[in-house]
Image (cartoon, rainbow, N blue to C red):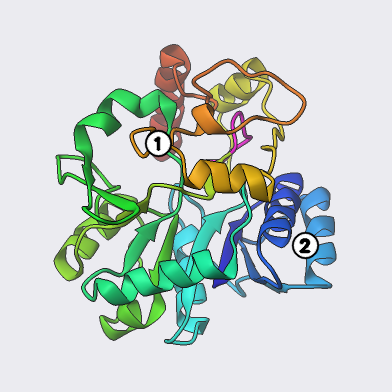
Amino acid sequence: MIFCIFSYNRGRHLLNCVSSIEQCIEAPDIRVFDDNSDDPETLAALAVIAQKHTVTTPENDAGQSKHGGLYGNMQRALDSLPGEAYACFLQDDMQLVRPLSKDELGAIYQHFEDFESMAFMSPTFLKLSKKEKSLKKILPIDNTFYFTRKIINQSAGTCYSDIFIAHVGRLQKKRWTFENREKLNEIQAQNYFEPMHCLLSPFIMWLPNVSCYRGKKKSLALKIAEKQCKAGLYPAKIMTKEESEAFIHRDDKMLPFAEDHISIVGVNLKKPWSLHPLEGRRVLKSLEKIELAIAKIL
């Protein structure tokens, strides 16, 4: 499996993400696609990573949106991959949390072969903050270690998510082109493929209380929110092989909500974890909307 990491100005998070893959995957193929980061810490991190892995930056604007050049870089990554590959796309504010054996990776590949109309698979833990919604959507797939989600009126997450394992050849056969919004990619995936199959024993999680950007910028509201939540790097403890085996063979009624199975190194964070500084901060969200509206006028 090829791991493609998309990054921007979060050097410590990027190093943690790369390190987690190195610890969990034997001889990993890691490729970093950076969105022209400009802070010294991230540039130093990229230089370190480039000594062992491939680092790519766009020569020009990769296609701006609220995600910066994320989708342009995702397209660049997809176009560079061999058709026979399986690729895991993730972002620098995430990490692997348990080791994956060759047998487990082989089982993932075989599952793609068993479902020929599927191109995307979700490898991420569920978010405890969205537990009520998740429970209404989950549809177990009989005799497998996967589930799907009901197609309900939502922007994404049924047939597509920005974090995925993909059968590269199936995307390339459809001439897949990433749109600049997750919702549009969800619609495109619904037209081409069956719903994503989601791992009942996932291996990737979002880190809590991360620093973030909107279109490579930080609004005043976002800066205040980051200060309030003490945004920083809060890495997850990587499971031992024994812990990973116990997790895989747990009661399958125990759905993989991250906070139920994972611990954060050196700190006891309030649950459910906050995965975005503005989450749960209505006043600051409103302030940001006003800031963005004013910016468009100016």
Q: Is residue 121 magenta?
A: no
Identify the residue at image location x=62%, y=49%.
98
Identify the residue at image location x=45%, y=36%.
295
Would you name the residue on which mark 1 appears? 251
Q: Up-down: is 81 above or below 9?
A: below
Residue 160 visible, this angle: no
Quarter assignment of residue 296 = top left
**Residue 35 vs residue 290: left or right?**
right
Q: Amino acid at mark 2?
A: Leu
In front: 120, or 189? 120
Category of crowding for the residue at label 2, using alpha-carbon neighbours closer than 10 angstroms: few (below 14), some (14–19), many (at least 20): many
Q: Position of residue 122 (x, y in %)?
A: 39, 54
Category of crowding for the residue at label 1, using alpha-carbon neighbours closer than 10 angstroms: few (below 14), some (14–19), many (at least 20): few
Q: Position of residue 225 (x, y in %)?
A: 58, 20
Magenta-colored span: 207-214
Identify the residue at image location x=15%, y=46%.
151
Q: Up-down: is 276 above or below 143?
A: above
Q: Quadrant of the N terminus?
A: bottom right
Q: Amino acid at mark 1?
A: Asp
- Of helix, strand and loop, which one carries label 2? helix
In front: 176, or 108? 108
Q: Position of residue 189 (x, y in %)?
A: 23, 63
Q: Position of residue 238 (x, y in %)?
A: 68, 44
In front: 7, or 166? 166
CA gap between label 2 and label 1 equals 41 Å
> Of discs 2 and 1, which sits in the foreground?
1
- Of helix, strand and loop, which one carries label 1? loop
**Residue 27 vs residue 87: left or right?**
right
Would you name the residue on which mark 2 appears? 46
Quarter assignment of residue 115 = bottom left
What secondary structure do most residues of the magenta stretch adopt?
Answer: loop
